[in-house]
Image (spheres, rainbow, N blue to C red):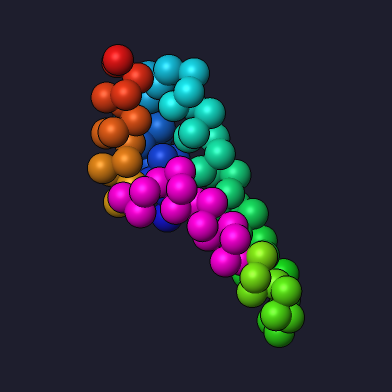
Amino acid sequence: MYAEYFSRIVKLRGVPNLNKNQFIRYQKIVAIEYYLKQLKNENNNPKDADYTKMFEVENQLQKFTGNKPPAQLLEEMLKLSLE
């Protein structure tokens, strides 16, 4: 969801002007989303431990995104980059 949105924005408007901290946040969100997708696709019959790992990774993603929609999150990151 976030990675797809960020990718569309880069294609339409170019790379967002983020400070170092927000750029790291941006990269972590993309990496966590990719990892979560891999966990979900890895097994058709995940074990209980896999569900636990997915839950932990989803919580990490929520920590970085605050459950905000992608557009709102990017706007926040751009504002924080100006401070």
Q: What secondary structure characterizes most of the magenta part?
A: helix
Does 44 sit left or right of 63 as displayed? Answer: right
Q: At 36% from the left edge and 48% from the top edge, which residue is drawn? A: 66
Quarter of the image for residue 39 reads: bottom right
Write the start and end of the magenta stretch as one range. 54-68
Q: Outermost residue toward the bottom? A: 45
Residue 4 can be seen in this image? no
Q: Which quarter of the rendering shows the C terminus? A: top left
Q: Vertical placement of 79 versus 76: above or below?
A: above
Does 4 sit left or right of 24 as displayed? Answer: left
Of residue 25 and residue 5, the one placed in the foreground of this image is 25
Q: At 64% from the left edge and 74% from the top edge, which residue is drawn? A: 51
Does 80 sit left or right of 10 as displayed? Answer: left
On whether residue 66 falls in the magenta region, the answer is: yes
Residue 7 can be seen in this image? yes
Residue 50 place in picture, x, y as percent: 70, 72
Residue 47 place in picture, x, y as percent: 73, 81
Of residue 7 and residue 77, the one placed in the foreground of this image is 77
On whether residue 39 falls in the magenta region, the answer is: no
Does 45 sit left or right of 1 as displayed? Answer: right
Q: Which quarter of the rendering shows the N terminus? A: bottom left
Residue 42 place in picture, x, y as percent: 72, 69
Q: At 40% from the left edge and 32% from the top edge, which residue is drawn? A: 10
The mark total stands at: 0
Quarter of the image for residue 40 reads: bottom right
Q: Vertical placement of 11 versus 64: above or below?
A: above
Q: At 49% from the left edge and 33% from the top edge, which residue is drawn? A: 25
Residue 36 place in picture, x, y as percent: 60, 59
